[in-house]
Image (spheres, rainbow, N blue to C red):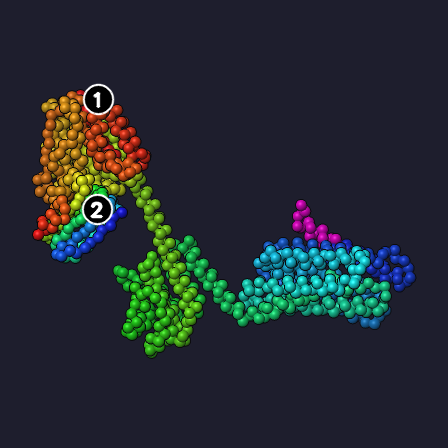
Amino acid sequence: MVDIIRTQEGEYEVIKIIGEVDASSSIELDNAISEAVSGGGKKFLVDCTSLDYISSAGLGVFMSYIEEFKKQDIHLILFGLNKKVANVFEILGLDQLLNIEENKEEAQAKLG
Amino acid sequence: MISSKAIIRLTSLISIISWVAMVFTELSIVFSDKNNLDSGFGNEIPKVALSVFILSLFVFFKYRIEKAESVNFVDLLWKVFVTGLITTIVSLIFRLFLTLLGNTKLSENVLFLEFIYLINLGLIASFLISTFIVWKRLILYQKSKFLLTVWQIFEYALLISLLAAVLPIPGLVEMEKFYMAFLILLGIFLSANMKWVAYLNFKQKWKSILLILLAMFYLGYFVFTVFSLSEDLSRISPQFLSFTSNTFLVSLICFIFIYSLFSLLVILFNLPTSSVFEQKLEEVVNFQRLSQSIQTEQSEERVYEILLESATSTVFADATWIEIFNSNGPSKFYTHKISVNEIQNIKSHINSHKVSGILEPSSDRSRNLNKYLSTLRSSRFRSILAFPIYVKNEQVGTLALLKDVSDGFNKEMSKIIDTFTNQAGISIENFRLLSEALENERYKEELKIAKRVQSSLLPKVLDHGVDYDLIAFSEAADEVGGDYYDTFRINKNKIALIISDVSGKGTSAAFHMSQMKGIFHSFAQLDLPPKEFLVRANTALSRCLDKASFITTSYFVIDSESKRVEFTRAGHCPTLYYDSETKKASYFQNKGLGLGIIRNEEFGNYIQTNCFGYKKNDIIVLYTDGITEAKDEKGEEFGYDRLKEFIEKVRDKDILSIQEDLISELYEFTGSKAIDDDYTTLIIKFT
């Protein structure tokens, strides 16, 4: 049960994830990111303020793009993770590989 | 109860006896009258015998015809025809006999004439009553309660008239005319029920007309014969008892004649419209075939074929085709009296006239394309009607109907075909759902196997050192998960210990878990430092894990000689450690990264080795995220803090009790036996 809303804000695109990302809904997340990336944009903000839960399958989606982002010079920054979700990213070690910021302003600043 | 067979036999016997009785008494009355003798029989006896005769015939035919299973109307009319034929032939034989006799003395004999009259009377009575029972079935076809009541009144009224002829009730004779009129009116009223006619097809209607005409002919013949005979007789013998004034018989004759006439006219007037009824009926049948096709036919192709046949026959199309689009190749065609080449010609012609989309995917309306077709010189068709076929709101194809006359299709036809295509779409959808359900069933079966494989991968016995106890517990959720733990004795003092959680569920998770087991047993025996173990495991897994899969692991080496534990964490849940000196539990916060997340040599940069010395009564709890993420009814997670508090509470117990308490605490917390994710714990207590 997840809703993904994509909006273009200036030179970057905001991908807002609402709800829970589990094994089945991770496919939607994967589709959304893959569509966004194939659109040719290089700068993305992932709004996680309404993300309540993410399972290992959801983390797998982010993980699977790390190589591709690096190769294509794509900047993707996550922000607004609640404590529980942030903890899940940290335990797996993904916080070391993904750009994760407190809030939107910091994320925007990071994007430049 | 007497069986209906016995009733039929009994009534036929009674009817024969009563008829013989009637003949005997009547003849003796006439004979004695002629010879001025006393016959010894009352005049009413033949009447009574006739009534008994009629009554038993009535019951006889009631059981013969009314109880018969068949509701085929033509069969019923056929019965009338056959009864009429037999009775008429018998009657004709006697007439022939009479004619052959000519003007002999016998032909003038009143007794002989009387005998023939009585035979004819018996015959007409059986014909009338059998016909009456058939008419009853026809009239009461699709009966209402009201109709049934009226009919019962009619039957009882007839019975009363039968009794009235026998019983000497004074004043009844004057009433007889009115009573008869009442019966006839009732008969006319009942004759208005002709619902059965609508269910005859064209051929059956013709047959029915013929049969009814013949029945009317028999009726006319009998009436003529009986009346003329009785007239002759009454001239010769004054004592002769005429039955022509019998209310029952006359009313019955009138009723049967009226109903025959009505039916004949109704069928005749219905003849021209019967083709419409038949067509409607065929539509219903076709519709049913379409909707049932999915239960009997096990392929989508068959549904399209039925749609093609039904549509063609319903609108009398000269040619029909169904095109099913295929995203990966050319469309598939189902055709009726048209070649694919011709179809392509028509399609390209219509497209060239900028009527976009009608025969292509994504058209949403059916349209009449007649005016475009008329400009296609080479085509033999002048009308075309096209419909999209939708399955789950997605157009899968088109149905096109063609006729060689212009304006060949009307609104009615277009409506019917529209329902046909809709129904076909629903059938296809059902068919697909059914296949999916079967697929699911197969998938469940596979999961069962995977689950067996997975549980066989977990060790039955755990190795452990001299100065600690070790216990493990694992319970899989309904779906196959990928929790794994194992131990390996490196040497006398060193034990390697692992706990892993494979991302995802199902068969792929079980496969990755078996890969992890292979890696653990290969590398653990090399006595590698924990960090080196993870780096090598990552390299090995990078080649076999799919893109979005990873494995979290904690790898421990416990050395009983130096009393030290060295471990690394690859994205796995932080290890809980209870320190018996400070009496506090805490989580190790070392850096780590899941196996398979980075698939190159950089991986080692994200791994940090931890090392600590242990003492008596220290406890290590290893677990998978199924434990910390177990939710209660409100959706709150069991969490790290609860686990920590729990271990501080049970610190003094032995490991078996600790494990049992933890499991019961978890189930108490979630409040249900069904678990979302695998529960796995590995508890070590140093001694």
Between the residue at mark 2 and the residue at mark 1, the CA separation in whole angstroms equals: 43 Å
Q: Residue furthest front?
A: A105
Number of residues whose C-alpha sits closer than 10 Å to that of mark 1, classed few (under 14), some (14–19) or many (20 or more): some
Q: Is residue B326 left or right of residue B9?
A: left
Q: Chain of mark 2?
A: A
Kind of element beneath mark 1: loop
The residue labelled by disc 1 is B652
Q: Is residue A71 above or below residue B130?
A: above
Q: Position of residue B196 (x, y in %)?
A: 58, 62
Residue displayed at 68% across by 64% down: B185
Q: Nearer the viewer, residue B393 or B643?
A: B643
Residue displayed at 48% across by 66% down: B279
Tell if the residue under mark 2 belongs to the same chain as the one under mark 1.
Answer: no
Q: Position of residue B449 (x, y in %)?
A: 30, 40
* Magenta run includes residue B99: no
Q: Is residue A15 left or right of residue B217?
A: left
On residue B221, the disc is none
Q: Is residue B523 left or right of residue B650?
A: left
